[in-house]
Image (cartoon, rainbow, N blue to C red):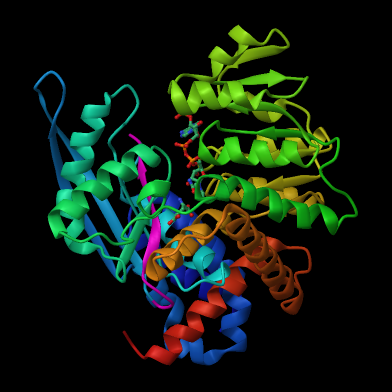
Amino acid sequence: MGNQYYVDEIMGHVLARNPGESEFHQAVREVVESVQAVIEKNPAFARAKILERMVEPERQIMFRVPWVDDRGEVQVNRGFRVEFSSAIGPYKGGLRFHPSVYLGIIKFLGFEQIFKNALTTTPIGGGKGGSDFDPKGKSDNEVMRFCQSFMSELFRHIGPDTDVPAGDIGVGGREIGFLFGQYKRLTNTFTGVLTGKGLEWGGSLVRTEATGYGLVYFVTRMLQDRGTDWKGKKVVISGSGNVAIYATQKAQELGARVIAMSDSNGYIVDEEGIKLDTVKRIKEVERGRIREYVDEHRSAQYTEGWKGIWSVPCDIALPSATQNEIDAEAAEQLVKSKCIAVGEGANMPSTPEAIEIFLERGVAFGPAKAANAGGVATSALEMCQNSMRLNWTFDEVDRRLKQIMDAVYDQCTGAAEAYGAKDNLVVGANIAGFLKVARAMMAQGVV
Ligand code: NDP
Ligand code: 2IT
């Protein structure tokens, strides 16, 4: 079977079966294109329809989430949990609460999660969930009532050995607390059914920092391979949420100068280096906007519009806000400013056109499903500690996280080289993740 024929056939099927879900199509196409060489080498995978099975979620749950706001008005949101693959462990992946959420976004995230989770070396399958609920501007009580209603349906589908949700955009410690409380009440069990829990009730040290730290550990390896490190590098990090904040912290610790951050309204540039304590207070405590930073720091400027951040010249870019935030134009701007490395903290932040530009122009590129795997990997470490009913120290978890990010990097470079795509970590990540899941599926029969 010819290469393009196989890609076209699978994509034709995916497009027809999942109309209108453009983000899902985008995520699937990248994987299918990357693994076609593997399928050709292993005809048994084609006969067993491994890829055809992988693109079809094992189970998809959609449900009504009614709740009452502070004015006494009834609100109705939509809830999702897509259980994509349990080939190598219980479904695992975050919950996203954002008004843009629809089935196509949850499916793209759940699909990517299968391969990311396989790369972590830990035994977790792939899933994702969320809602079109917008936590912004809601009171704590409104968020609590929403989370309780959401869990009142979700609880029957999840469990510590079945499906273990966590956070993502709009879901942090506060939301996980409310969700956990309701699960515990409904099931009368205290288990590790969610990760990202508070430290007093089953959470793991380093989980809060893990995605950002892991991203920086991964990019460290990319830089090492090019004979350099973080010292004195100018870094631009989009977003100012969980991933962006802890990527900034670790990059600064390693001697980088982080000069720009953003939110969905606009971006700040502080050439003296971002004062992270201010960002943390504004975003984590006050739940404010990034523009408030300039009220306190005269060295900084604020510009309306989130996209402009990619016109800020930098050595290293860490997109850590959302999908498709770097398009071809932004990628060209980064290449023009002589950016040497891009590490994806967010999921699918670069469009296919942008990725092509980075790869062709020699910019070191760390794809999301490898570079941001530290978050879910540390979730797996939280599950492990919950099962043992023990807690590791910060240093112990951080050491394991570093070790995992090294293993993720080695798998990506190894698979890329084995399949004649040296330095292409996109192909490497997709192939290494795919092979682990494919072998497990082969062993388990047609299920
Ligand atoms: P948060 O909710 O903590 O922060 C999200 C940040 O991104 C905010 O600054 C937000 O700005 C900005 N943002 C969100 N949507 C948009 C948008 N449509 N346009 C521009 N900016 C936007 O989420 P996280 O930091 O947890 O997640 C960030 C990314 O990292 C996501 O892609 C997520 O899937 C990915 N990720 C997260 C992991 C985790 O452990 N949390 C693990 C792996 C990946 P605003 O406040 O204005 O909305
Ligand atoms: O995209 C991701 O990997 C996450 N949001 C983290 C998922 C998790 O289960 O910790």
Residue 388: where, in percent of width, then height? 41, 70
In the displayed structure, does residue 163 sit left or right of residue 233? left
Q: Residue at x 38, y 52 (%)?
A: 166
Which residues fall within the magenta stretch? 87-99
Query: On the rendered image, what quadrant is the N terminus found in?
Result: bottom right
In the displayed structure, does residue 316 sit left or right of residue 286? right
Q: How many marks?
A: 0
Residue 268: where, in percent of width, then height? 63, 19
Quarter location, residue 50: bottom left
Q: Residue at x 38, y 55 (%)?
A: 202
Q: Residue at x 26, y 42 (%)?
A: 178
Viewer-closest of 97 and 28: 97
Viewer-closest of 441 and 278: 278
Please check the rendered image and state whether residue 287 is part of the magenta-colored stretch, yes or no.
no
- Asked whether residue 41 appears in the rendered view, the answer is yes
Residue 176: where, in percent of width, then height? 33, 45
